[in-house]
Structure formats: C-alpha cells, structure tokens
Amino acid sequence: MSEQIIDTREIKITEVKEINKDGKKFKTFKTVTKDGKKMDVKFTQTCLNIPSEPCIVVVDKEKANVATNRMFPCLWIKDVIEIKPLVVKESNIDDYF
C-alpha cells in the first residue's frame, strides 16, 4: 500500500460578511495574499466544511486554485481539510508600553 502525501496550504480567511441580495442571503470571504493584496475566496457547492467566521482553513493544494479569468483574481476552494481558529489580539498596547 502506498500512502498518498497531501501538500497542504493554510489560508487565512480575514473577512466573512453576510450579504442580502435580491432576497437571498449568502456569505462573502476575503483573504490576503503573500504580497498583501486582498483576494475574494469562494467555495464550490461540493465543499461541505465552509467557515462561518474569520479563521485559518487548511486545504489540499490540488483542491484549490486561483481563477485569473476575472478582473480581480479569486481563490476557489473545493475541499477544506481543517478549520483552525484565528487568534486575534484584543489590544496591542502591551507591545508598545
């Protein structure tokens, strides 16, 4: 038996917003690329493990890709392996004083 090695990536979902458009509710997601630009994140209909708040999602590199056929690139995720909590400091004042 050969064991398949999965090449994973951790993607930080920085924004989750609920939108009401034409009477339909849906969520929008954003991440930040390694060069600091915001990017939309979308999940396919087959993805069952979709986050509901900012977090870190672990994905198989083969089940995520960036669509560049739009004005702005968009990250499409087909499957989420794990959702990790995003630890956000309440205050950074201790870093300075």
Image (cartoon, rainbow, N blue to C red):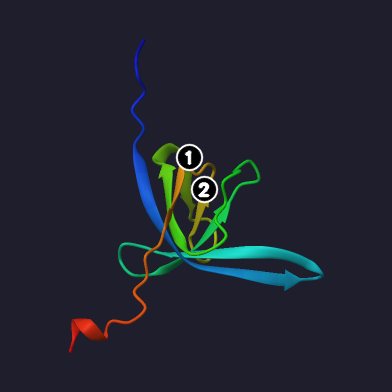
> Closest to the observer: 50 or 77?
50
Q: What amino acid type should be assigned to the residue bearing mark 1?
A: Lys
- Tell me: residue 82, above or below residue 40: above
- Counting from the top left corner in percent of width and height, residue 56 is at 41, 56
Proximity of marks 1 and 2: CB atoms separated by less than 8 Å: yes
- Tell me: residue 97, above or below residue 24: below
- Farthest residue, direction right: 23
> Closest to the observer: 96 or 36?
96
**Structural crowding at the residue carrying mark 2, measured as other residues with C-alpha within 10 Å and reported as few (<14), some (14–19) or many (≥20):** many
Between the C-alphas of marks 1 and 2, the distance is 6 Å
Identify the residue under disc 2. Answer: 77
Image quadrant in which the C terminus is located: bottom left
- Counting from the top left corner in percent of width and height, residue 36 is at 33, 70
Label drawn at residue 63: 1
Judge left or right: residue 93 versus residue 25. left
Q: Tell how many labels.
A: 2
Label drawn at residue 74: none
Judge left or right: residue 39 versus residue 25. left
Q: What amino acid type should be assigned to the residue bearing mark 2?
A: Ile
Image quadrant in which the N terminus is located: top left
- Tell me: residue 69, above or below residue 62: below
Question: What's the residue at 30%, 66% (across, down)?
Answer: 35
**Structural crowding at the residue carrying mark 1, measured as other residues with C-alpha within 10 Å and reported as few (<14), some (14–19) or many (≥20):** few
Question: What's the residue at 46%, 41% (across, down)?
Answer: 81
Name the secondary structure under disc 2: strand
- Counting from the top left corner in percent of width and height, residue 90 is at 37, 78
Judge left or right: residue 29 versus residue 87. right
Question: What's the residue at 73%, 65% (across, down)?
Answer: 25
- Tell me: residue 71, above or below residue 51: below
